[in-house]
Image (cartoon, grey):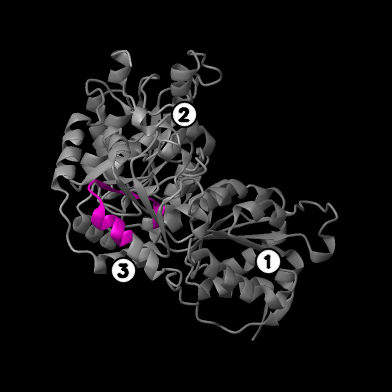
Amino acid sequence: MELTGAQIVIECLKEQGVDTVFGYPGGTILNVYDELYKHRDEITHILTSHEQGAAHAADGYARATGKVGVCMATSGPGATNLVTGIATAYMDSIPMVAITCNVGVSLLGKDSFQEVDIKGVTMPITKHNYIVKDVNQLADTIRKSFTIARTGRPGPVHIDIPKDITSLKAEYEYKKPEEIQRLSNEIREEDLDEAIKLIFHCKRPYVFVGGGAVLSDASEELKRFVDKIQAPVTDSLMGKGAFDGNDKNYTGMLGMHGTKTSNFGVTECDLLIVVGARFSDRVIGNSSTFAKNAKIIHIDVDAAEINKNIQCDVSIIGDAKVVLRKLNARIDKLDHTEWLNHIYSMKRKYPLTYRKDVLTGPGVVEKIYEMTGGDAIIATEVGQNQMWAAQFFKYDKPRKLITSGGLGTMGYGLGAAIGAKLGRPDKLVFNIAGDGCFRMNMNELATASRYNIPVIEVILNNHVLGMVRQWQTLFYGQRYSNTILNDKVDYVKVAEALGAKGVRVTTNEELEPAIKMAMESKEPVVIECVIDCDDKVWPMVAPGSSISDAFSEEDMQGGK
């Protein structure tokens, strides 16, 4: 049948099983929005307060569900406002399709009103991108975009459609979405054999889990692998939940704000098995001393990650779930009791601690964990709030932590929480924020209240840009340049003005009733928790130092 380009867009979204789209209309995309209106019973459109919020919401939806998130915007500033959200998804390998419309084909390249070369802008931050200048290519381009977003290492794809293409007509015929195959054709037998050889001969193995294990849904295979080789497990921020955070072999996060047990243990191990991690600088610290006593096996779906940041001894290219299945089939149970007992003793010696007599960021996160029983999705902003959420909430399953790892995007969390809640309406969704981050995205509270989306925004208000202040305290001689936010903003009144409930908490005694109220509420709630401006994230590794140099507050007081 013959359809307009705008109708083809909607039909292709329906083909792909898209039920929710986040966006903001404008002149060039009006034809698409007109069709959205006609199909509003089939596709829910969420009008965010800002296009960046739409991109973050699509990202959060994708992380929480494993589906492709979809966002839309008009040309010019509408399109450029998506850029930070697209880059956030790109850095963390999140499947997303961003659709923008542009000026007509004849007006492209002429500095027309609200024209920008958004394809050129997004090229470095997308897995692939397109500008569709022929309506006959539109349907196949949309279909390819969804396939690319989900295949192998996932990522965002951007489609730009000139306005006249949305009104021109072409033949359209329904096509069933392409089934995505797990990438396994590059898994070589000799690589598996070399890995098995190292595993059989090691005495002190450690497993390091990254976001790839989450994206490949490899949790069951990972648990079986760990039980077979009898190894302790650490993870990156993006890998949280791939391995149960309550398991006795789990030792906490690795890196700059990782636990001492993980940092010291990886330094002591003789074999590091890395599953779907890219060796971020925040994880490895000084690359020349990282895991200096260990052979390294690197399992990753993306060959470009092999030997990029850290040289490995054996690499296995392929989907983590498939690789672990193959390894599990070849491994008998090993005995590393002595090594595990050493790790357990370190866990007892170096627990994560915080002050219990006053309201603190870690205390707030731990109370949320206690009251939800861990059965909640936690979105975060970036900074101290993010690290405390990573340290003090135990993630027993994947897709429970929704956070910007690679790009570190302040203002990410509230939009992402909205997307996560719409994708998983059965789950409680909290966004753990700092007051600095909340200022960047507080407008999305209006989105939550407009659609009555019951997300719980927890602001850890220390009246400063906490993580930057922590660096200024430790490394910049306490020169607090532009990091103090001690002004007259009243976050409870802001919440109420934007249509949400607001409550302020200043003591431990006030915290539990506030969380209980928020959990029982059927509308968005903001809990402002006032904490000290000099609360810090511990342990810490100084920039450029070895992870074995992790230090705590007690170490500093002891003169380290």
Q: Find residue 362 and report its horizontal and vertical position in percent.
A: 30, 31
Q: Quadrant of the C terminus?
A: top left
Question: Disc 1 marks which residue?
Answer: 31
Instruction: Sort mark 1 into few (<14), some (14-19) or many (20+) by Cα contacts within 10 Å.
Output: many
Quickly name the residue at label 3.
326
Task: From the top left corner, tell me how far across and down residue 334 is, in percent.
Answer: 17, 57
State the SS at label 2.
loop
Kind of residue indicated by mark 2: Pro
| Residue where numbered disc 2 is placed | 543
Q: Is residue 362 left or right of residue 434?
A: left
Q: Secondary structure at mark 1?
A: helix
The residues colored magenta run 195-212
- Residue at the image point whose x is 19% and y is 56% from the top: 227
Q: CA distance from mark 1 to mark 2?
A: 50 Å
- Mark 1 residue type: Asn
Q: Earlier in the sequence, mark 1 or mark 2?
A: 1
Q: Is residue 143 visible?
A: yes
**129 in magenta:** no
Query: Quadrant of the rendered structure where residue 136 is?
Result: bottom right
In the picture, measured across the screen, residue 485 lies left or right of residue 9, that is left
